[in-house]
């Protein structure tokens, strides 16, 4: 019973954090040259990047601050996810996939700290 609940929760987390954003990026039919690989590896953070650019008028320093805040929010949400996972099964080492999902979320937050500067090739607006 507890393994089934954990598997359902893991599938729900993967669907929310990766599948829904991939479908959204795919429906936009916009390939962003600045973030081509990151756009498909970390689609949720890509959505945040585009949202931060709209909010701040594309000010790079403010976008970096928002992305760092996003890292801490992701960390706290990941800890809550791990607590929910461990509530149903006290022995955490039975489910390393939950820890891998947590690490994926942290790496995705850091991946958007580095972006190319605006130039002739890359348009940031």
Image (cartoon, rainbow, N blue to C red):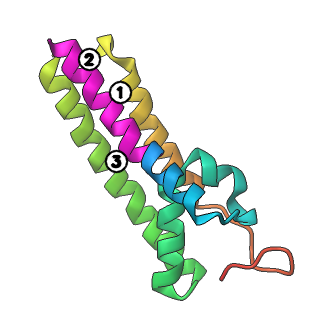
| Residues tagged 1 and 2 counted as in contact (Cβ below 8 A) | yes
Q: Earlier in the sequence, mark 1 or mark 2?
A: 2
Q: Which residues are magenta?
A: 1-18
Q: Residue at left 65%, top 83%?
A: 125
Instruction: Give the side of residue 27 with respect to residue 9, left or right.
Output: right
- In the image, residue 124 sits, relative to residue 99, either above or below, namely below
Residue at the spot of label 2: 92
What secondary structure is marked by label 1? helix
Residue at the spot of label 3: 75
Residue 79 placement: quadrant: top left
- In the image, residue 93 sits, relative to residue 75, either above or below, namely above
What secondary structure is marked by label 2? helix
Q: Residue at left 47%, top 73%?
A: 51
Foreground mark, 1 or 2?
1
Choose between 109 and 68: the one closer to the eye: 109
Identify the disc placed on residue 98. Answer: 1
What secondary structure is marked by label 3? helix
Instruction: Give the side of residue 23 with respect to residue 85, left or right.
Output: right
Residue furthest out toward the bottom: 57
Give how far apart the Cα atoms at labels 1 and 3 are: 13 Å
Q: Residue at left 19%, top 22%?
A: 5
Give how far apart the Cα atoms at labels 3 and 2 are: 18 Å
């Amino acid at each position: 019973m507890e393994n089934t609940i954990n598997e359902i929760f893991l599938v729900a987390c993967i669907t929310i954090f990766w599948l829904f954003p991939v479908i959204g990026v795919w429906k936009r039919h916009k390939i962003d040259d600045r973030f081509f690989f990151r756009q498909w590896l970390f689609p949720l953070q890509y959505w945040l990047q585009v949202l931060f650019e709209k909010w701040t008028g594309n000010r790079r320093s403010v976008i970096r601050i928002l992305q760092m805040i996003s890292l801490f929010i992701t960390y706290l949400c990941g800890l809550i996810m791990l607590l929910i996972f461990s509530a149903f099964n006290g022995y955490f080492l039975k489910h390393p996939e939950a820890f891998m999902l947590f690490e994926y979320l942290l790496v995705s937050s850091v991946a958007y700290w580095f972006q190319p500067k605006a130039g002739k090739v890359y348009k940031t607006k």
